[in-house]
Image (tube, helix red, strand yellow):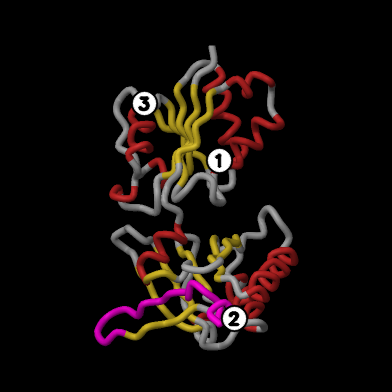
Amino acid sequence: MSGRLAVIGLGPGDDAYLTAEARAEIAGAEMFYGYAPYLARLALRGDQTAHASDNRAELSRAEAALTAAAAGARVAVVSGGDPGVFAMAAAVCEAIDHGPAAWREVEIAVVPGITAMLAAAARVGAPLGHDFCALSLSDNLKPWDLVCRRLRAAADTGMVIALYNPASRARPWQLVEALRTLAASLAPDTPVIFARAVGRLDETVTVTTLAAAPEEPADMATCVIVGGPLTQRIERPGRRPLVYSARAVPEARQ
């Protein structure tokens, strides 16, 4: 008899961001699979077990979870943020697509969470108030040339761009290169937001410009939001600036 597999988004950090649906799924699961720092955020009971794996072991993690679920267990695969945004839901679906027939009989639930770009945007106002896109700067699963072509295409359309996985110890140069690529299409004073560890004790949020952005530190816990031509910065004495993207292009107001 097949069991159940829930792919759960834990949100950006603080338990306050965890949805009621996610809490219920966590309470009902027996076995948990995930990247160790995400599993560490769970307060598991004695009858619940955790199976940690490396951050790059997404497909093998999904396969192990599906094997357990196909054997009848109630399984949870946990992701930070939202499981469908550069996270584990795609890996689980990919494993099912290429795996044994028994995995297709497993009941699957994808439980949404608050993704990093939404938490980051909320800290500064409404930078995603007009059209936007999300891009991962990691070239582990796609060539860097493709990343650059997508950056140029997004910037040329004027969309706000949320950058995930902006820098790691193995690729510290990529964010600077991405910002240089965007600078060919965007004005130097374009607002840029660096939001790290939103919702956690070590949270930092900085509003800067595209010209100054290469000097800002970033890591895998950082989401970088690069504005577009419609993105405005509102200075407030003694407070962090508000950033928003206008709802309409100038031509639409005429």
Q: Residues within 10 Å of mark 1 (few under 14, many from 20)?
A: many
Membership of 146 in magenta stretch: no
Disc number placed over residue 89 in the picture, else none: 1
Which dot, 3 or 2, sits closer to the camera?
Answer: 2
Viewed as shown, does residue 99 lie left or right of 208? right
Q: Which residues are magenta?
A: 236-254
Q: Classify mark 3: helix, strand or loop.
A: helix
Q: Earlier in the sequence, mark 2 or mark 1?
A: 1
Which kind of residue does numbered mark 3 sit on?
Answer: Gly
The quadrant of the image that shows the N terminus is top right
Q: Earlier in the sequence, mark 3 or mark 1?
A: 3
Q: Residue at x 56, y 22 (%)?
A: 106
Label 3 close to label 1 by CB (< 8 Å): no
Which kind of residue does numbered mark 2 sit on?
Answer: Glu
Q: Residue at x 71, y 56 (%)?
A: 142
The quadrant of the image that shows the C terminus is bottom right
Q: Earlier in the sequence, mark 3 or mark 2?
A: 3
Disc number placed over residue 251 in the picture, else none: 2
